[in-house]
Image: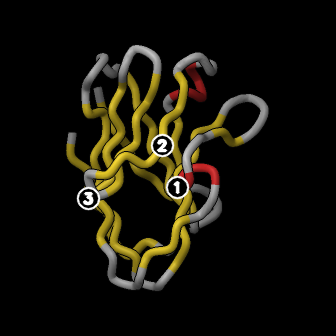
Amino acid sequence: MYGILLPTNDTKWFHAQLEGTMEGQVVLLFKLLFENSRDIQIKAKNTVDWVGTKPCCSSPVSFEAGTVLDIAIIHTSLLYLIYVNNVYCCDFTNYIPYDYANSFHVHGSIALYEISF
């Protein structure tokens, strides 16, 4: 298992690629420090469109400048559960194709990040 957080072509997006995860495992935990007050969105991609449920996935959530976010992605048999600062945020189903089911994006003005898994 490994996690990678990389900038995409759009510098506002960071891409977290998850592979080889086991059920119930925290597959990626990372910190984001926002240098400016910004809205963020956490999204998963399938072959048709961006998908997600609950407020912080389907629409942006605002954070003050200097906010540090602890984001955890937990793999279960049916869902990827997303927690932000230890609070349930949203989930993504596992039935979308494998190539896309493990792709998550976080949108925001990111000053630094840390990854642990």
Image coords of residue 79 (percent x, y):
46, 25
- Tag 2–tag 1 contact (CB < 8 Å): yes
Q: Which mark is residue 56?
A: 1
Q: Nearer the viewer, mark 3 or mark 2?
A: 2
Residue position for label 2 = 90
Q: In the image, is residue 97 above or below residue 4?
A: above
Q: Quadrant of the N terminus?
A: top left
Q: CA distance from mark 3 to mark 2?
A: 21 Å
- For this orientation, the residue located farthest to the left is 116
Colour scheme in use: secondary structure
Q: Quadrant of the C terminus?
A: top left
* Label 3 or label 2, whichever comes before in sequence order: 2
Query: What's the amino acid at mark 3?
Result: Glu
Query: What's the amino acid at mark 2?
Result: Cys
Image coords of residue 72 (percent x, y):
31, 45
User: In terms of secondary structure, where does tag 1 sit?
Assistant: helix
Q: In the image, is residue 95 above or below residue 104?
A: above
- Residue at the spot 55% in from the left edge and 58% down from the top edge: 41
Please indicate whether residue 12 sits to the left or right of residue 74 in the image: right
Instruction: Count neighbours of disc 3 (C-alpha within 10 A) and say few if under 14, some if 14 to 19, many if 20 or more.
Output: few
Q: CA distance from mark 2 to mark 1?
A: 7 Å
- Tag 3–tag 2 contact (CB < 8 Å): no
Instruction: Count neighbours of disc 1 (C-alpha within 10 A) and say few if under 14, some if 14 to 19, many if 20 or more.
Output: many
- Residue at the spot 58% in from the left edge and 39% down from the top edge: 44
